[in-house]
Amino acid sequence: MAETAMGGFWEIGAYRTNVKRIRDGMEQIEELSRMAKERAEIEKQYVRSLQTFSDKWRGQVDRTVPEGALKRGWLTLVEESEALSMQHGRARDRLLDEIVKTLALFRKENHHPSAFRSPKEIREIEEAFEKAQKHWKKLFERVESAKKAYHGACRAEKSAGILVQNAQADTAVTPDQVNKMKERLMKAKDDVVKTRKHYELQLQEIAQYRGPYIENMSFVFEKCQLGEMKRAKFLIEMMAGHESVMADLVRNRTFINLHIDMEQKFKETNESVLQADLKQWSTQFGVDAATLWPTYEEYSPEMRQISNSKTMSKDNGGVVLTRQIIKNEEVPAAVSTRTSTIASSKRNSVIPEPPKPSNYSDSDTGTYDSRKSAEKPPKIEDAKGSQEKWADSQTDSQPATTPDSAKFADFDDDTPVAPVRGRDARVLYDYNPMEDDEIALKKGEIIELLSEPDSLGWCQGRVGTACGLFPASYVQTV
């Protein structure tokens, strides 16, 4: 009867299995937290890999694939990887926020570790079990002691009875010895009766306390069960939350709609769309591209356009300066060739206006100013006048008169003298070049003249090793 009650949980110290379950439960919470962190790290690495993948291929497609349905379809795949990386990034954030942080909060509220002892919750359960078993343990030890004494008395009685039987059968044993053996047998029987009564009394006492013992132990065990239920429910909720985060990657409506749209786009990209792309390519780079075929052009000797392909390519919408050259056999060819060569390189250039003297006024002279050539083209001298001017400049070595030099004819000593080819000139004003074929001028430096001013007022000169064009009105012959 007593042995029936003493099995499994009810044995002295058997409660330690329940205490171990509490300790294992604490470790399980920690293990689940580590698992969620590891999965979040996997998601983070996957997101980083997807971002690297999408950046690489987006740049590759933008650089190498021409505009059209093929590029749009290709970029659709890239956008899918970007959307997927966003979804997995959100999954990683949810794992850390909803799972890891919640586990840490539960552990903080329900588990209170100690530096040198077991956690508070484990110590409380151990102390409760020990208290519930304290009195039962004393009674049990008494029962065990009484049982041991009774069983010893029974063994002594049996040994004494065997000795008496052997002595009576042995003729060598005296009657006195036989009587002493019989006395010891009677004493052993009395000890058996006495220890039996004590043993039965201890059993009755422990049996009376069995009810309170079961009640106390059951109370502590139910407390363990409630704690385990709370922990198990919490872990199941966290596992379900983990599963929900992963399931959202599959059931996410945005991602599903994205794939539906992708599927629709690829279905709509049929042969007609591809044919339109091929047609567009043909109009730009194929047989349908716009072309200026050679056509008949009538020669017009009266007008020549001062043009330069390099300058035209820079500013196709700018104002193109033209000058009129009258072809006449009486005009020396040297003049026409020289002035045309210099002027052609400055077809779009307007000569910068040098600093004006303090007494200067636009009403001082009615001569033509090349700085206003964009508004008022110069008058063309007749062939005879041009020939006489050219002849005078060659024979007398007098500076050629330009529209800019005529502007300052009213000044005396400070009036710049028109540069003459083959001579040196002093720079009167600083000049910063605005084109690649121009040369920079610094006030006061000496420049070697390589040509006379053209009809637009430009000269060609050299300073050191640098050669280029400059406004004739910015220098004075020395």
Image (cartoon, rainbow, N blue to C red):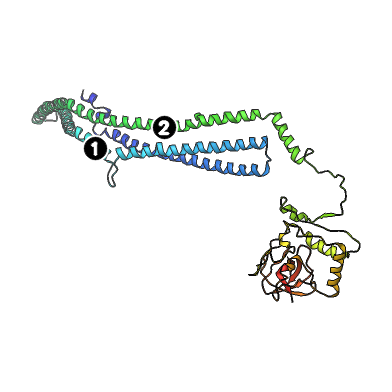
Q: Is residue 470 above or below residue 137?
A: below
Residue 440: percent from left, percent from top: 69, 67
Answer yes or no: is residue 35 visible.
Answer: no
Disc 1, SS: helix
Residue 82: percent from left, percent from top: 55, 38
The kind of residue tagged 2 is Gly
Q: Residue at x 20, y 29 (%)?
A: 216
The answer to which of marks 1 and 2 sits earlier in the sequence is 1
Residue 50: percent from left, percent from top: 55, 40
Q: Quadrant of the C terminus?
A: bottom right
- Nearer-the-camera pick, 152 or 454: 454
Disc 2, SS: helix
- Nearer-the-camera pick, 121 or 147: 121
Q: CA distance from mark 1 to mark 2?
A: 31 Å
- Farthest-out residue, top: 1
Would residue 64 appear left or right of 307 to someone viewing this image? left
The residue wearing badge 2 is 241
Q: Quadrant of the N terminus?
A: top left
